[in-house]
Image: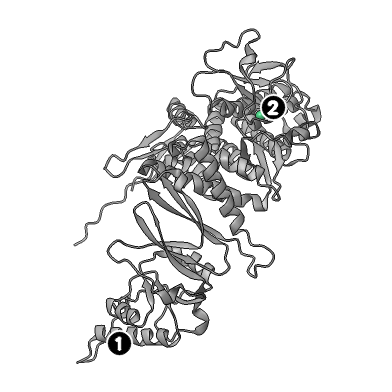
Amino acid sequence: MERVEQKKPSRCAAGPFTSASLREALSVIRMMVASCYGPYGRLKQIHNGSGGGVTTTSQSMALLGGMSLSHPALQLLVASIRNHISTFSDCGLFAAILCCSLIDRCQSLPVSTHKVIKLNKRLLDTSLSYLKSEDCACKIEVDFTHSKSILDFTRSVLRSKPACMMTVKEVDYMSLLIVKAFLHKVPDESCPSHLLGRTLFVTVEGPSVMESAFIPGVLIEEPAWSRVRPSSSLLSTNIKLALFSLSLCGELGDTGEGTMEVMVGVDPENVMLDQLIVLGKRLVDDHVQMVLCQKVIHPSLKQYLKEHGVLTVDRLGAALMEPLSQMTGAQPIASLCPVSQVSYGSLKQISKASYGNKHYLHLLPSDTTVCSIVLCNRNETSVKELTRTCQTAEHTLNLLLKDPWLLLGGGCTEAHIAAYIRYKSSIIHRSHLEDLRCTASEYKLVADCFCSSLEAVARSSEHDGGETLTDLQDGHVWSMPPEVSVDGEQTEAVHTCGCQLLQRRDGLKWSVLGSPSEPFSPRNRTEISPLLLAKEPLVLDSLTAKCNGIRVAVDTASLILDLAYIVKDEN
Ligand SMILES: [Zn+2]
């Protein structure tokens, strides 16, 4: 008997939404996210109250994915940032810090929320059009004929995650592997498909990072209890293979809502097994040498195929199906009906490989853009963080194919844009203010708030109590060691800016980042260009990911500032 409960009416909680509780909750999340930011970011351990594993990370997706939040505004904020990360991989912490700082600062402005949102939108447009313009002095074009910029960028991503626990040499080595895999999967003109290849990550816990490797093709882990031994004939070239996406275990399929009638004297399992053996005969007649199956292969079919010299590997899982199909040209077979010749694929070679205490079958195709990176690291925590970080680097490199530009990192871009916006705001024409229907003082207040929020992100990578300075020529950031006082001429303690592009020189004027100073026009691209050719390794960010990160931060902040009511259905 079903119990029917009376439906409760929806509960409508009315504002004010911009209460102290939101500010307090935002402040906690901002401090937590900001403390993870940059190469010296502090790690976080994520525990689940009901048990399960513990994650040690400073990576945005792992951090935000592991939180359960009760405040609706924070749920909205985290959902927006996670959505950004799932598409762009990088700049998740950046977007979260910027969004929290913007909300916090805008809440206390003596300007109506409607105007704040409108002006923030305008400032966002100004920032993005500057970043995309020819004049932008904080971006560099990727030259694919040289690997310097993409190596610098990959190194910047890997260096920013201390839980990977890598030395400088290990970071350089891993960066090389990732760039190699990236270049390998870009199809050249001779490739008929013009499809971007894939990089698969295989993780091994125990060996040092320096034992990680780049391998063309796919590695399939062999379960310890069933070592597959490729016979010598399989080591020949041009191995014919069949790839099954359906289960070959002989069980009757799910009939769903329907029913199945079985005639008296017929054993359905035997009928299925007969069908499998018919399939096996067909594969042997077609000279198939290898059968790969996403699910389970019946032991009798396995035995039959083995007797006929066919190598079988089952339980591959869904994730390997597409890369295997792309790499071998095989079409995944989804039924027991007679297999078409065109479904078969081919491999150049099969061999065995071992990393740590794991054993693999190495499937090497004749001509492919699919490759694997074996990621080794000393313990579970470091290998997991290394995997997340390498996936971010690999995904963000893909974005360069569409938009081949990188931004100066280390906080320099944020501080530079803030300097640019402050200068543009100081000379804004009255007609623009009339269009925006605001006064000059209102515009200045909101612009200051926008710039301070960007500068707050730039300051977030300093975790040891040191001061962050900016130069009054290019608006880059310079970190002062904690023991050095900013008073007087102590700037000799700083040598290079955050992105490593600029060197300290006499006569350069300084200011503490975020402190009031006279607006100045940062030098433009033409003046900076010769420096961009310098040989120093630069700290670089993805332009595509950062532009979207700024947009998501400002849009989400506007949405949260505009919230007035929470309607909560408690049914
Ligand atoms: Zn810089």
**Residue 280 placement, left or right of 436:** left
Work out whether residue 89 can be spotted: no
Point out residue 115 in the picture as x, y percentages from the top left corner.
Answer: 64, 31
- Amino acid type, mark 1: Asp
Circle 1 residue: 274
Point out residue 134 in the picture as x, y percentages from the top left corner.
Answer: 78, 40
Quadrant of res 273: bottom left
Location of residue 560 with respect to 460 vertically, above or below: below
| Residue sitting nearer the eye, 479 or 352 | 352
Give me the residue at 62% from left, 22% from top.
Answer: 478
Q: How many marks?
A: 2
Quadrant of res 495: top right
Work out whether residue 367 can be spotted: yes
Q: Residues within 10 Å of mark 2 (few under 14, many from 20)?
A: many
The residue at label 2 has a CB less than 8 Å from ligand 1? yes
- Amino acid type, mark 2: Leu
**Residue furthest front in the image:** 232
Point out residue 436 in the picture as x, y percentages from the top left corner.
Answer: 72, 33
Quadrant of res 196: bottom right
| Residue sitting nearer the eye, 291 or 427 | 291
Q: Which mark is residue 111?
A: none
Circle 2 residue: 502
